[in-house]
Image: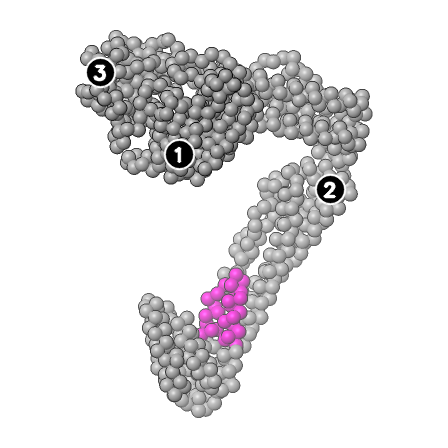
Amino acid sequence: MFGISKNSNAGIWLAVLFLLSFANLNAQRLPKYENVYKDAMAANNKAFAYSLFSEYLALDSTSTRANLYFQIGILAYDLSQAFDPVAQYDDYMAYVSRADSSLKLCLQYLNEVEVKRDNDLFTGVQAADKKLTVTEVYDYVDKIIEDNKQQCCNISKIHDAYMNLSENYINCQNLYKDLCRTHTSVKQIYLMPYENVDIYGKLEGMRELLDLTDEYLDTYKSLLEKMPVKGYNNVEVTKAKIEIFRVDGLSTADFRNRETTIWDYRQWADYIMENIDGFVMVYQEIINAGNALSRRINSFNTNRTLSDTYTAYAIDDDILDSLNNYAYYPALNRYITYKEEKLNFLTKSRRKINSADYDNNGKLDMKNKLFYYDGLQMAYNSLEHMRLDLATYTTSTDTTDLIAMTFHNKADFEEYLNDEHVENGLEMNNAFENLNRYCIKKENYIRRTNYVAYKKQDIPLFLGNGFYRSTQPQNYVTKCIELSNNGIYLAGSYIGKEGFATAYIALCSPDTSNVVWLKTVDIGKVVYDNCATALYPTFDGGCFVLVIAKNVSDPELMYSTVIQYNAKGNEVKRLTLPEKTLGIGRYIAYDEVNEQLLLAFYGKEEFWYTPGAKLVIQKINLDNTILMQAEIILNGELIKIIPVKNNSLLVIGNYFSIINEKDTEYTLELEDGSMQSNVFTALFSEDGKLLIINRHAINGGSGYAIEAVKINNDTINIVGQKGQARKDSTIPFTPSESIYLSVDAEGKLLYSNQKLKVENDTR
């Protein structure tokens, strides 16, 4: 009847104003119906016309004008066709019902007078002669009523079939999801006792519900073939086999799509029930498997050679099948699986990377090291969890099979569990000591006394102190050493003939035999000493370097510049930071995904551990826009800044004292009054607000962090050692007992190999 008008919004607005203008008038001032009809036709918009005629009827609710009901009915019928009859079933039925009731009222009030008066207004009715007759209008309306009724009946049948199909499939899937929530593996389902009716009920229910799903699917497809509905013809449904429990079978199906996939829950339920009903316990084979595991474990204990060729021990498939189906004696089952986990833990702990001397072909890679030790720690935790789970059976009658076949009595069983706890702990402690010795080796690697020659001068391959005029002229002082994937970056200052310091950045070959390239930077000109104080290698082989310029006459006056170099030593970008009083730049890191720099400034003196010094942390864009700035008073040392959830920053370091924004000071003193260093983590929000300070103190002693690595979004690993922190970073490390901490994204402790006193100050 109508199209969609490009000016429909304006038309609707005018119509609303038109209706509002006479909404409160009495019946004598009701607008002429012909004018309303004319406006409705002119709008060329069915939804608008329908609303206009409906509003008119609301004003004249006792109207007996057949054409008014004709227009509303025809428009409601036409508008119903725009709805998805399944997804928008309620909306569709509302318009269908309105069409039916309006067209029946049209027939009720239809007579010769009505047809004669509105002869030109019964749009769509074909006249045999020049003028419409009552019969012609009646037959036209009656046919629309019948078509509407038949279509409504068809849609209702299809909708009911769709709802029954979807409901049964969803109920079937929910039973499967219940098993996924209560069982971590199919093995756990097999370990169920026979009398567990709940599992059997769910498996039977899945079979029945999927059968009903198939029946309603056939009905649904058959109805669509006989009564095609807009967008719902040629529905193709395929069944997918559940191969991996808790991975497959979880995605939903939408039967409104022309093509969809459903999971074959019946086939899976049949398979599980066949295995449950058909398993046979084979005692001796399981005990033999346990003995084989014990022999392998003893072999590892006597031969501590490290090798990457060790593989996890796999029980023979036929024994494993028996073990997987083992249900009556859970203690024996857990004993065998504990042995298997123990052997896998030993296999991991004897890899070559678990050595203080393993340097990844000359690349001292702390990140990979900590990833490995994180995995080893998880394996240890899993093993201890299984041992504790097995220990719960020392007070259970279910250990009869285990004691009779493996141990002489319950006391032997308890002694075995205690010995395992000691043995597992020693293995993990040895691993931590290897990590500690490796950390010392890595840190001392950059403090060795070697040099690399450059233009008849030597550049130190170790950290040095001083870059001011007091330093001997025509000497290089190295302040930063960072390993890159294409060599070793050095940065610091060069003391010229006049005694002023110029910053330098150099890339050495991986074997430190030569300098690949060297650049000098003088951002302070004549009266300033320059030094590169922080450096960050990028993945593409280039680097970012933080250079400071310190006024010779006024050491309090200094400013900083960030320079980016590519792998060939070409300058890519230079950012002169606007703030001149933040302190000496100590830290730089680059977020290559978000293209943001993390910077840290601390104090005006050369060394860390300055009482009352301010640690300032900034996050900036490469256009020099400061995105965040955070501050804290710290007598300590920054180790790393790690981006975590919600754009927050986790700061990790060592401290003698920390003062928060409320001037609350946190220190750790021993009985003799001496201050002790320990590890802290501080979480800052994206706007620089201090959210929480976590202080991880060694009970009765001191310690310090050396390195921190983000393992994932929820875990950061920190490695260090006991003893007082070094105020001078050029001093070599001396071996001490290792400290290993695992913290969450807020810096709160998850695990430590040391007994710690943990205090949290939440803002």
Q: Disc 2 designates what residue?
A: 274
Local crowd at mark 2 within 10 Å, few (<14), some, or many (≥20)? few
Element type at mark 1: loop
Magenta region, main secondary structure: helix
Residue 533 disc label: none
Residue 631 % position (x, y):
37, 32
Magenta segment boundaries in residue numbering = 75-100
Q: Amino acid at mark 1?
A: Glu
Please say whether residue 650 is visible from this viewpoint: no
Amino acid marked by disc 3: Phe
The answer to which of 377 and 196 lies nearer the viewer is: 377
- Residue in the image at 52% along x and 77% along y: 100
Closer to the N terminus: mark 3 or mark 1?
3
Q: Dot 3, crowdedness within 10 Å: few (<14), some or many (≥20)?
A: many
Q: Position of residue 654 (x, y in %)?
A: 44, 23
Residue designated by label 3: 500
What residue is at 50 percent from the left and 84 percent from the top? 107
- Residue 559 in view of the camera: yes
Q: Residue 708: x, y in percent?
A: 46, 25
Residue at mark 1: 661
Mark 2 vs 3, N-terminal side: 2
